Image: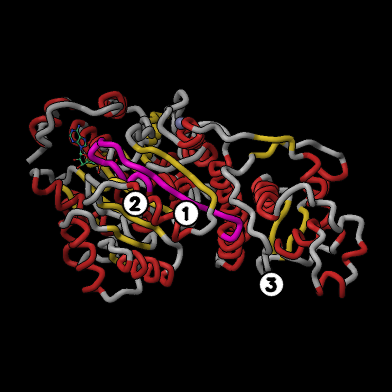
Amino acid sequence: MPKPHSDPRTVLTETFGYAEFRGQQENIITHVTEGGSCCVLMPTGSGKSLCYQIPALCRSGVGIVVSPLIALMDDQVAALRQLGVRAAALHSAVPQDEQRQTREALRAGELDLLYVAPERLMLGGFLDSLERIEIALFAIDEAHCISQWGHDFRPEYRELSALRERFPHVPCIAVTATADGPTRADIVEKLSLPKLFTGSFDRPNIFYGVGLKENPRTQLLRFLETRKQGESGIVYCLSRRRVEDTAEWLRSKGFDALPYHAGLEHHVRAGNQRRFLNDEGVVMVATVAFGMGINKPDVRFVAHLDLPKNIEAYYQETGRAGRDGLPATAWMVYGINDVVQLRGMIDDGEGPEEQKRVERTKLELLLSYCEAPRCRRQTLLAYFGDACEPCNNCDTCLEPPETFDGTVAAQKLLSCIYRTGERFGAVYVINVLLGTDDERIKRLGHDQLSTFGIGKDHSDREWRGVLRQLMVHGLVEADSDAYGALRLTDAGATFLRERQSLELRIDARPKPKRKSAVRT
Ligand code: ADP
Ligand code: ZN
């Protein structure tokens, strides 16, 4: 049965059963149906699939959808078949005889949409077979995978640029939910796309707040105590261990908290997930393993007890709050140790050096979000190429951070790191600055340095704030192999040599000083 070449609106209402297009959908669908190529950047859940499914049904020939996620392909194919669309998938998990049937249907022009894994598509023979049939369009899902700047680079995606050369007259639509500036530019260039559509990334009902990690548990407890009874939320932690400890501790404080991470037995995980979805007031303490594909509209808060990997991850994770449009909160605390730990994970990770450099840069961008003196929402949206007015619904809008001229403090700290030989961690260096009476400092003769005791004008806590910000500004780095030994970066050395100046934030509300701070 050849498909009736309907117009987009008819397909929207009759095939999909929706009354209206959303956001940019209509513009995009018209553009592609008329044969135009484009890149589409819209957040998760905004309806990107329709942007290629409808044009594929309106144009003659089969729409070829490239997707890296097998589970997602199968879901979409099943959903489309339910609607009477002739859809199929080709990937390694499809049984051989089904693959053969699909290839036959493809040859006979009996498919509306075909989902393929990228490595399949690029096999020489497969591309040849496509040249003999009519193709409505190519859709590249998760298009950020094409870029080394993307958080999920896949080498097999690189080959996709060849598609455009071989099929220059077939429209190509690349869609993604996460692409910063460089990734966007990469997608557009690699696939020679003449147009970019960007949806709004703003989640106006989410309040964003970021605080300094001091006593994370107590801070979390204080935050949870401000919430109304019966609210559901997610608390993200970096490690499985921390997930379990935190969940147990919250239970001891009377919260209905459950753990979730990939190391739990399958039935425990599934059971906890079910409780979270069905019951009110469950706090899910989880690693990032939790969330993909979870659709619970009334999650009222997402708390990060540890820093996420980068801004994209932060946006995805916090985006699980408030899908129902009602007020929700994204809460996070972070500190120097997070930075050191995440840097270490990147350094120790597998993969090429180039990739690690990208990840380090992305971590720095996240840190500058944390330290940003201006509206959080503006900072976040700018990352996705989106803009807004100061929102009045984030911590920095409600309480703008104060800053001070941190030039002298930065010089003192940088020279102290330098003078002690770039071999010591934060505690030691700060003790030298404070002129602390310390056995090790004396033994190493560092009480004789010109920098010994020059930092008495700031407290220990203030120095940690200065140090953290110098790290965020890329002037100091901590060596993850040498117990967090601090050293100057090239930029830090230049700063010192050229006597540059620097504005720093005053960290919120200093804690009352304890009388005798004993440190080890
Ligand atoms: P994305 O791929 O952008 O994450 P999806 O394409 O999966 O989002 O769409 C998210 C949900 O929104 C789906 O359930 C989809 O059916 C629904 N949807 C998409 N467009 C519309 C629309 N115009 N009207 C109503 N629902 C829509
Ligand atoms: Zn704001």
Of the numbered discs in the image, which one, if any, rests on residue 257? none
The mark nearer the N terminus, 2 or 3, is: 2
Residue 374 percent across, percent down from the top left: 55, 31
Q: Nearer the viewer, residue 349 or 494?
A: 494
Of the numbered discs in the image, which one, if any, rests on residue 308? 1
Q: What stretch is highlighted in magenta?
A: 318-337
Q: Residue at x 71, y 61 (%)?
A: 426
Name which residue type carries label 1.
Pro
Residue 486 percent across, percent down from the top left: 74, 60
Q: Quadrant of the C terminus?
A: bottom right
Name which residue type carries label 2.
Glu
| Residue identified by numbered label 2 | 225
Residue 127 percent across, percent down from the top left: 35, 50
The mark nearer the N terminus, 1 or 2, is: 2
Q: Which residue is drawn at 60% across and 51% down?
A: 512
Characterize the local packing of mark 2: few (<14), some (14-19) or many (20 or more) Cα atoms within 10 angstroms.
few
Name which residue type carries label 3.
Thr
State the scheme by which the image is colored: secondary structure
In this picture, is 363 found above or below 378? below
Residue 397 percent across, percent down from the top left: 48, 30
Q: In which quarter of the image is the N terminus?
A: top left
Q: Residue at x 19, y 52 (%)?
A: 88
| Residue identified by numbered label 3 | 520
Can you tell which of label 1 and label 2 is closer to the viewer? 2
Q: Does the magenta segment cover residue 335? A: yes
Mark 1 secondary-structure assignment: loop
Q: Nearer the viewer, residue 277 or 167?
A: 277
